Image: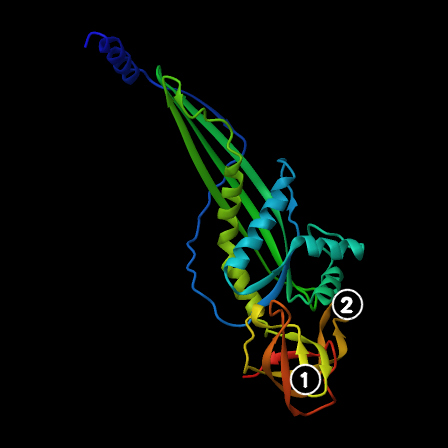
């Protein structure tokens, strides 16, 4: 019992002492986080690409790539998209000598969209990022707290027209705390994972908005080949296309452009007929085989488009 008296005295002394606090503030913002309500989606999926985000902050360059990787994960989790891997997107852009990050030119989007069969491309940037570190020290107790805040801006670009169809931003906050008693416990050093947590909190705020905006445009796929009455489509089970579904096919005619901006507004379309899906195509069901039910125009050809029939 006598041996415990010195320790008890120290605890009493610590409780009676005011804490000495130190803080380093690099940037702070307020943030309002939204809750996500997810449900299992069944239906056609759209092809979407995510360009590596630009890092506009003073922090390391990894923030941009980390933000785009997180968005790819969140979009894939919705079950509504086939997300083209960024490596594949970067490779196509490099081959075409196109800009591969940040705000890309509308004509670049259209060109990449045609090559990869994309419905939309998401570009973005980490516009703000900051970490606040605070610490409190008592005689025998120490605590360290870190708060990271990130703001991410995104734009959705229509891969057919090159027009920005939606823009949004989100701000996220992530916190952690570590403490020690008599030197035992966490040291409270800088936690790099707090960066990713703040970015994810920012990104999940607009994920559902991306789903909503991209889904407004009718789903389409392309004809990959034709042989007799068999029509091969570049969409299959992996994109939510099932046996028995019917699609209306069209040929794309003259391109319609805005006389002021030069951006593509759309194409003239000629109905070709209706096809019915009879089975999957490819080792993993990337495509499908369809049978021509009714022909109303010229014979279907590769690169013609098809939409789900009402």
Horizontally, residue 29 falls left or right of residue 20, namely: right
Residue 34 screen position, x and y as percent: 43, 53
Q: Which mark is residue 262?
A: 2
Q: Give the quarter of the image for residue 236.
A: bottom right
The answer to whether 150 appears left or right of 37 in the picture is right
Above or below, 72 relative to 292: above
- Neighbours of disc 2 within 10 Å: few (<14), some (14-19), many (20+): few
Quarter of the rendering occupied by the C terminus: bottom right
Is 210 on the left or on the right of 302, as rendered? left
Rendered residue at 47%/67% (across/down): 41
Specify the quadrant of the image occupied by residue 304.
Answer: bottom right
Of discs 1 and 2, which sits in the foreground? 1
Q: Nearer the viewer, residue 98 or 72?
A: 72
Residue 50 picture location, percent across and down: 63, 56
At 59% from the left edge and 79% from the top edge, which residue is drawn?
A: 279
Dot 1 crowding, Cα within 10 Å, few <14, some 14–19, many 20+: some
Whether residues under marks 1 and 2 lie with C-beta atoms below 8 angstroms apart, the answer is no
Quadrant for residue 238, please give it: bottom right
Q: Is 71 on the left-hand or right-hand side of 177?
A: right
- Seen from the viewer's position, the closer of residues 135 and 238 is 238
Figure check: 154 above or below 248: above
- At 44% from the left and 65% from the top, the residue drawn is 40
Residue furthest toward the left? 1
Against 155, is 145 above or below? Answer: above
Quadrant placement of the N terminus: top left
Tell me the SS state at disc 2: loop
Which disc is residue 230 wearing?
1
Question: Upstream in the sequence, badge 1 or badge 2?
Answer: 1
Name the foreground residue: 166 vs 35.
35
Residue 294 position within the rendered picture, expressed as x and y whole percent measured from the top left: 64, 92
């Amino acid at each position: 019992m006598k041996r415990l008296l010195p320790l008890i005295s120290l605890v009493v002394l610590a409780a009676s002492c005011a804490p000495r606090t130190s803080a380093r503030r690099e940037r702070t913002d307020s943030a309002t986080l939204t809750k996500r309500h997810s449900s299992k989606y069944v239906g056609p999926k759209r092809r979407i690409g995510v360009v590596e985000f630009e890092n506009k902050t003073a922090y390391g360059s990894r923030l941009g790539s980390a933000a785009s990787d997180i968005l790819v994960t969140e979009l894939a989790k919705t079950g509504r998209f086939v997300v083209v891997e960024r490596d594949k997107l970067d490779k196509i852009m490099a081959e075409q000598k196109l800009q591969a990050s940040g705000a890309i030119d509308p004509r670049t989007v259209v060109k990449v969209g045609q090559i990869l069969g994309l419905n939309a491309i998401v570009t973005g940037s980490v516009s703000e990022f900051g970490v606040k570190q605070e610490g409190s020290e008592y005689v025998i107790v120490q605590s360290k707290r870190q708060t990271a805040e990130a703001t991410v801006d995104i734009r959705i670009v229509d891969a057919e027209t090159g027009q920005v169809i939606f823009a949004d931003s989100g701000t996220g906050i992530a916190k952690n705390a570590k403490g020690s008693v008599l030197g035992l416990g966490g040291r409270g050093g800088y936690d790099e994972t707090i960066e990713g947590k703040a970015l994810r909190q920012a990104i999940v705020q607009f994920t559902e908005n991306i789903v909503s905006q991209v889904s407004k445009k009718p789903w389409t796929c392309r004809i990959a080949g034709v042989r007799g009455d068999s029509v091969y489509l570049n969409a299959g089970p992996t994109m939510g296309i099932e046996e028995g579904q019917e699609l209306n096919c069209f040929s794309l005619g003259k391109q319609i452009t805005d006389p002021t901006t030069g951006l593509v507004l759309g194409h003239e379309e000629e109905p070709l007929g209706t096809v019915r899906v009879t089975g999957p195509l490819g080792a993993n069901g990337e495509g499908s085989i369809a049978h021509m039910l009714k022909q109303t125009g010229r014979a279907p050809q590769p690169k013609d488009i098809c939409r789900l029939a009402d």
